[in-house]
Amino acid sequence: MSVQIQSTTRPVPSSILHNSTDVRSQYTRMAAAQVRHEAGRKLQAVFSRIRNRATWQDPAMPES
Protein backbone atom coordinates (compact mmCIF):
# COMPACT_ATOMS: atom_id res chain seq x y z
CA MET A 1 0.00 0.00 0.00
CA SER A 2 1.39 3.39 -1.01
CA VAL A 3 0.60 6.64 0.69
CA GLN A 4 0.20 9.70 -1.48
CA ILE A 5 0.90 13.05 0.06
CA GLN A 6 -0.97 15.87 -1.52
CA SER A 7 0.53 19.24 -0.96
CA THR A 8 -1.59 22.23 -1.68
CA THR A 9 -0.10 25.65 -1.92
CA ARG A 10 -2.16 28.59 -0.93
CA PRO A 11 -2.00 31.55 -3.27
CA VAL A 12 -0.01 34.44 -1.92
CA PRO A 13 -2.14 37.57 -1.47
CA SER A 14 -1.51 40.20 -4.08
CA SER A 15 -0.88 42.77 -1.37
CA ILE A 16 2.31 40.90 -0.49
CA LEU A 17 3.37 40.48 -4.11
CA HIS A 18 2.54 44.02 -5.19
CA ASN A 19 3.23 46.14 -2.19
CA SER A 20 5.83 48.44 -3.65
CA THR A 21 5.17 52.12 -4.09
CA ASP A 22 6.04 51.93 -7.78
CA VAL A 23 3.42 49.28 -8.52
CA ARG A 24 0.73 51.09 -6.55
CA SER A 25 1.48 54.37 -8.30
CA GLN A 26 1.34 52.58 -11.66
CA TYR A 27 -2.12 51.20 -10.79
CA THR A 28 -3.20 54.68 -9.70
CA ARG A 29 -1.99 56.22 -12.97
CA MET A 30 -3.82 53.58 -15.01
CA ALA A 31 -7.03 54.10 -13.01
CA ALA A 32 -6.80 57.86 -13.48
CA ALA A 33 -6.26 57.42 -17.22
CA GLN A 34 -9.35 55.20 -17.44
CA VAL A 35 -11.43 57.79 -15.57
CA ARG A 36 -10.18 60.58 -17.85
CA HIS A 37 -10.97 58.54 -20.94
CA GLU A 38 -14.49 57.66 -19.77
CA ALA A 39 -15.25 61.23 -18.65
CA GLY A 40 -14.03 62.56 -22.00
CA ARG A 41 -16.28 60.16 -23.89
CA LYS A 42 -19.32 61.14 -21.82
CA LEU A 43 -18.65 64.87 -22.21
CA GLN A 44 -18.18 64.44 -25.94
CA ALA A 45 -21.53 62.64 -26.18
CA VAL A 46 -23.29 65.38 -24.19
CA PHE A 47 -21.80 68.18 -26.31
CA SER A 48 -22.64 66.43 -29.56
CA ARG A 49 -26.26 66.01 -28.39
CA ILE A 50 -26.41 69.73 -27.54
CA ARG A 51 -24.89 70.68 -30.90
CA ASN A 52 -27.31 68.44 -32.80
CA ARG A 53 -30.30 69.81 -30.90
CA ALA A 54 -29.25 73.42 -31.53
CA THR A 55 -28.73 72.72 -35.24
CA TRP A 56 -32.15 71.11 -35.70
CA GLN A 57 -34.11 73.62 -33.63
CA ASP A 58 -32.72 76.74 -35.24
CA PRO A 59 -31.50 76.04 -38.76
CA ALA A 60 -29.70 78.83 -40.54
CA MET A 61 -32.01 80.65 -42.98
CA PRO A 62 -30.51 81.59 -46.34
CA GLU A 63 -30.32 85.29 -47.11
CA SER A 64 -32.33 86.23 -50.23
Image (cartoon, helix red, strand yellow):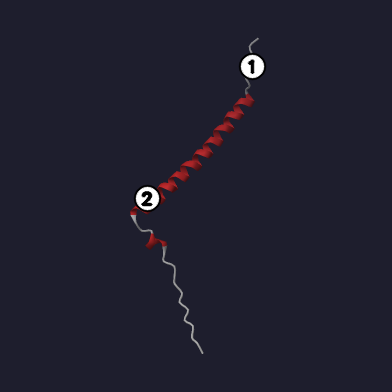
Residue that appears at 48% across and 79% down? 6
Q: Residue 41 at what x, y percent from top left?
A: 53, 39
Closer to the camera: disc 2 or disc 1?
2
> Which residue is label 1 attached to?
61
Residue that appears at 44% across and 48% down? 31
Residue at the limit of the structure toward the front, as seen here: 2
Q: Where is 14 relative to 50, above or below?
A: below
User: Pointer 2 and pointer 1: residues touching (CB < 8 Å)?
Assistant: no
Q: Residues within 10 Å of mark 1 (few under 14, many from 20)?
A: few
The front one of 7 and 61 is 7
Residue at the limit of the structure toward the left, as seen here: 21
The amino acid type, in three-letter code, at marker 1 is: Met
Would you say 44 lies left or right of 56 here?
left
Residue that appears at 43% across and 47% down? 30
Image mark for residue 25: 2
Q: Residues within 10 Å of mark 2 (few under 14, many from 20)?
A: few
Secondary-structure class at tag 1:
loop
Residue that appears at 56% across and 36% down? 45
Would you say 56 lies left or right of 22 here?
right
Please state the total of marks drawn on the protein image: 2
The front one of 59 and 16 is 16
Q: Residue 25 at what x, y percent from top left?
A: 37, 50
Q: Residue 48 at what x, y percent from top left?
A: 57, 32
Asked where in the image residue 10 lies, by quadrant, the reply is bottom left
The amino acid type, in three-letter code, at marker 2 is: Ser
First in sequence: mark 2 or mark 1? 2
Q: Residue 37 at what x, y percent from top left?
A: 49, 41
